[in-house]
Image (tube, rainbow, N blue to C red):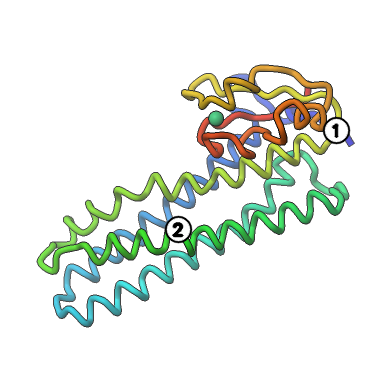
Amino acid sequence: MKTSLRRNHVPGRKPEPILWVNQYQTDLEAIYDRWAHHVSNVLGSEKAIQGRQILQDIAVLLLIDDLSTLGKRRLPQSIRAAGLRGVDVGDSLRTFLANQVLQNSITLEKSLLPDVRLRLRGLSQDSNPEAVYDSLVGMKSRVGQYAGTYWKILNRAIGERGGPVVWTLDSSSTHCRTCLEYGGRAYVSFEAMLATTNGVWPAGGTDCGGVCRCLLTSK
Ligand SMILES: [Zn+2]
């Protein structure tokens, strides 16, 4: 079941799995940015307090629904990004994937939704559309960080292809404690790595939650 990750790798280009994650992150942020533009225009013209609250409550639900839908569509593709296209990935990875997709939606609802709602309610009634947008856009990079779930599934799927693996540190990132401790090393197998790291893998249980952008590669 071992396949080469670098099958389509062109020198000078990032490995293909990283491009897939980057695209997901870009699309999460684009959904948020479009939403922030739209909401700022609508709220900029609605001054009645009751009307604003209804608009805000609906707007935040639509945002969470859009982000959650993108997750349901894209996160399963991480298996393909790991080079497991057309391979029977087994029950353990399939169950893990399903749980992660569900958890992603729950986190968006329980963590992001209340914070965006709070941000909207804190806006002054007199704010013009530009001021509303400036306030909302501050949360865009946080939305992009939900792409960490993609890293987590991707790296686990790469590990479960079998064979020796290398925890590769992204040279352009500042790394967290866990990635520095366990990264930059080769392991005889994914299972051997988990035994050494107490169950932690790149973006799976690390302090950074995937922000370090470490990639598991075949040795
Ligand atoms: Zn890290």
Q: Which mark is residue 116?
A: none
Say what amino acid the circle numbered 2 marks. Ser
Real-space Cα separation, disc 2 to disc 1, in angstroms:
35 Å
Vertical placement of 20 versus 55: above or below? above
Q: Of marks 2 and 1, which one's residue comes earlier in the chain?
A: 2
Q: Categorize mark 2 by other alpha carbons within 10 Å: few (<14), some (14-19), many (20+).
A: few
The secondary structure type at the circle numbered 1 is loop
The residue singled out by tag 2 in the image is 111
The secondary structure type at the circle numbered 2 is helix
State the residue in front, 143 or 178: 178
Query: At 24% from the left edge and 71% from the top edge, which residue is drawn?
Result: 42
Residue 104 location in percent, x, y? 57, 56
Query: At 71% from the left edge and 53% from the top edge, which residue is drawn?
Result: 97
Snapshot quadrant of residue 14:
top right
State the residue in front, 91 or 73: 91
| In this rendering, position of residue 128 left or right of residue 140 | left
Q: Are marks 2 and 1 in contact (CB under 8 Å)?
A: no
Query: At 30% from the left edge and 48% from the top edge, which residue is drawn?
Result: 138
Vertical placement of 187 versus 157: above or below? above
State the residue in front, 88 or 104: 104
| In this rendering, position of residue 175 left or right of residue 113 | right
Residue 2 location in percent, x, y? 86, 32
The residue singled out by tag 1 in the image is 162
